[in-house]
């Protein structure tokens, strides 16, 4: 696919209501700042990708609109009706109407994304009528989806969407490509996702925010305390259940 025919889309919820499943470990202000940092990481990576001729943010959040404008990134108004899938469907119609042949959808909560990962997705994507998917590690979700044309299949982002997107691609007759990418394994929705993300230092705003805010130390201490307590009462228990017991929300 030629570069000038491909655009990326980042759907963004309101920062004020983002990441509700992190309520057990983060305050409302911390969740808002985390959502903003992750969005900026994703947006900055996509704007650096030479294979993309455009980056679009679809949102109804004024802060997200301003952050996009500061970087010269186009914004589309989120119709709100239909949630995330409705926003992506609206973006697909807009991109198709202005002549784009392909649409890469990247959620705003995968801060580990890098340009090399994006290049791999694009290089795997081939036929004029194709769907290329990157699965999430934990919940069966979809952490990146490249479609050509943009509306080649309906989208259904969320829990177990990877399997659903595969089925939709097969039923539509589109060529299906899948690949797993370490940088796109984790979308940060739950406390355990934060701990997984923090296992490897990264030059991202998100990592820096988690460290400088003290959230990282707090989460690690909670994790150690939970494991210590579990080991006291269940000395022969495996470690994984103890750590995952803070995975709530």
Image (cartoon, rainbow, N blue to C red):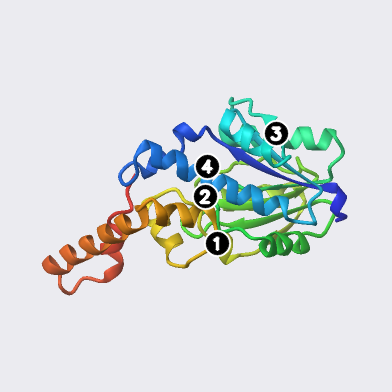
Instruction: State the CA–CA distance, disc 3 to disc 1.
Output: 26 Å
Residue bearing the label numbered 2? 160
Q: What element carries label 1?
A: loop
Residue 215 vertical placement versus 21 (above, below): below
Q: Residue furthest bottom?
A: 236
Determine the residue positioned at 46% across, 42% down: 33
The quadrant where residue 27 appears: top left
On-image quarter of the C terminus: top left
Nearer mark to the viewer, of 2 and 3: 3
Label 3: how many residues lie within 10 Å, few (<14), some (14-19) or many (20+)? many
Which residue is identified by label 1? 203
At label 2, counting other C-alpha atoms closer than 10 Å, the crowd grade (few under 14, some 14-19, many 20 or more) is: some
Residue at 73% from the left image edge and 62% from the top image edge: 119
Which is nearer the N-term, disc 4 or disc 1? 4
Query: Which residue lies at the image location 31% right of the left edge and 61% below the top edge?
Result: 220
- Residue 198: x and y, percent? 43, 62
- SS for dot 4: helix
Query: Which of marks 1 and 3 precedes in the sequence?
Result: 3
Left or right: residue 234 versus residue 173 is left
Disc 4 and disc 1 in contact, CB within 8 angstroms: no
Dot placed on the residue nearer the N-terminal end, 2 or 3: 3
Point out the tag, 2 or 1, that comes first from the N-terminus. 2
- Residue topped by disc 4: 36
């Amino acid at each position: 696919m030629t570069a000038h025919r491909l655009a990326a889309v980042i759907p963004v919820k309101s920062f004020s209501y983002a990441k509700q499943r992190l309520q057990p470990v983060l305050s409302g202000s911390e969740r808002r700042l985390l959502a903003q940092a992750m969005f900026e990481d994703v947006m900055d990576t996509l704007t650096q990708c030479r294979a993309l001729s455009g980056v679009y943010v679809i949102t109804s959040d004024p802060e997200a609109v301003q952050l996009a404008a500061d970087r010269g990134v186009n914004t589309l108004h989120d119709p709100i009706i239909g949630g995330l899938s409705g926003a992506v469907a609206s973006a697909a119609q807009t991109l198709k109407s202005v002549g784009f042949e392909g649409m890469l959808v990247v959620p705003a909560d995968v801060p580990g994304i890098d340009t090399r990962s994006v290049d791999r997705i694009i290089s795997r994507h081939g036929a004029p009528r194709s769907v290329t998917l990157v699965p999430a590690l934990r919940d069966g979700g979809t952490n990146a989806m490249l479609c050509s044309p943009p509306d080649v299949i309906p989208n259904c982002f969320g829990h177990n969407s990877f399997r659903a997107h595969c089925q939709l691609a097969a039923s539509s007759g589109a060529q299906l490509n899948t690949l797993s990418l370490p940088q796109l394994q984790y979308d940060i929705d739950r406390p355990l996702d934060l701990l997984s993300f923090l296992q490897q230092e990264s030059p991202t705003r998100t990592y820096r925010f988690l460290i400088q805010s003290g959230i990282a130390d707090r989460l690690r201490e909670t994790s150690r305390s939970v494991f210590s307590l579990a080991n006291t009462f269940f000395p022969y228990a495996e470690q994984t259940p103890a750590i995952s017991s803070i995975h709530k929300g």
